[in-house]
Image (cartoon, rainbow, N blue to C red):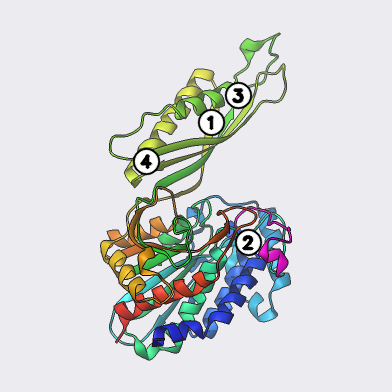
Amino acid sequence: MDHIQTKVENLKEEMIANRRFFHSHPETGWFTFFTTAKIASIMKGYGYSLKMGREVVKPEARQGLGTKEAMQKYLERAKSLLSKEEQEFLPVMEDGLTGLVAEIDTGRAGLTTAFRFDIDGVDVTESREASHRASKDGFGADIDGIMHACGHDGHITIGLALARIISENLDDFNGKFRFIFQTAEEGTRGAVGMEPTGILEGIDYLLGGHIGFQAKKSGSIICGTNKLLATSKFDVNFKGRSAHAAGAPQEGANALLAAAEAAINMHAITRHADGVTRINVGVLRAGEGRNVIAPNGYIACETRGETTELNEFMYQRCMDIIKGVSIMHGVEYDVKLTGGTSGGDSSKEVTELYEKAALESPYIKNELIVKEFDFGACEDFAHFMQAVQKAGGKSGYLMIGTNLAAGHHNCCFDFDENALLAGVDVFLRSVYMLNGK
């Protein structure tokens, strides 16, 4: 057992306890008040300087916000779960400005290495079946309708353990370390709100990853994730005019037909020779009565593209279609962006760094190491990754292997908690390679 594994093993029980603690108190989107305050309290105790609220979130850049009533509800819930000392972190999170950035400086020249860990849950009601481990062992979600069904409770845990080890062994390193605990990853809503505040400035390496996904065996790892798709998520409301469907149809403006025609034509958008594109209209609601010309229509949509440019192609074609059908049917429309992120590939240098760390890690089986993998899906980290790369830094995204009890976003989702040790170990070995004295 080398010195890195020893450091990781010493925190095993703490990591399992932390994962289960955060699992039992899930929050979603911009309502991660409790989670942010807990992380802030812990990171402050480790000696990190904190940035919160407007320092890390630009209010008007956020997407996919909930209602003021829901925000107040979850703020009150957070207060009931936090100590008085922890509640002191809440005022700066006004209007749901959750998430935080923590930094520690060795005082010696060197790289600025950053990490991103997402902290929000999913809109899923957790299984209460006795066969589900969280129910059986007493750490199931304390609220219906929200669950850590994607492993972000594990990501928080890995981030906190890594931060503790670095702070307790600061003499081993040069440079600076920055931890980005990001909210609203689900729905790809958070990075666009945090990036404009400058939290990525000066970063040489930005490291990120996820438990599971395409790394489906414990002891496995995907070192370099490529082809993360860019996406735009948006809602469209069509406003028409009601009229009697038989007595005066000519006086109406049919928003139902506009919404339906938009949905059909969006799915008919030509694909692009430069790469993968996707379109989906997932919700269509319209109308008020059988004999009434529909005065309203609503569609919930998303586009995706292998690159940011391809996604923009799909999004602009959707906007053309929406405008066209609205003119045809004489209705008005409003488009509201609810989420979105960039596409991209991991930097080769980071892929190789992860691979080298994985080959040294006792928690990773060499025969289960995959150097590169084309993801073909979206992750909010890509927005941060592309921004760092454009500024001249390096960034990459790994997947930590784990056996799953059920798939991501399933009510019975659960993962092998040994993945926590594997994640901390690989990140820590990468840190020693980048910032080690």
User: Nearer the observer, disc 2 or disc 1?
Assistant: 2
> Which quadrant holds residue 215?
bottom left
Q: CA distance from mark 3 to mark 4?
A: 26 Å
Give neighbour class at mark 1: few <14, some 14-19, many 20+ (Cα, 10 Å).
many
* Residue at numbered disc 4: 312
Q: Amino acid at mark 2?
A: Glu
In the image, 277 versus 356, the foreground residue is 356
Compute the Cα span from label 1 to label 4.
Answer: 20 Å
Q: Are marks 3 and 1 in contact (CB under 8 Å)?
A: no
Rounded to the nearest angstrom, the CA distance separating label 2 from label 1 is 32 Å
Above-or-below relation of 170 to 423: below
Residue lying farthest bottom?
Answer: 171
Q: Which residues are magenta?
A: 121-137
Residue 100: image x %, image y %?
Answer: 51, 70
What secondary structure is found at the residue carrying circle 2? loop
Q: In the drawing, does residue 200 fall left or right of residue 419?
A: left
Q: Mark 1 — residue?
A: 333
45 left or right of 344? right
Q: Which mark is nearer the camera, 2 or 3? A: 2
Residue 27, disc: 2
Q: Main secondary structure of the magenta part?
A: loop
The outermost residue toward the front is 367
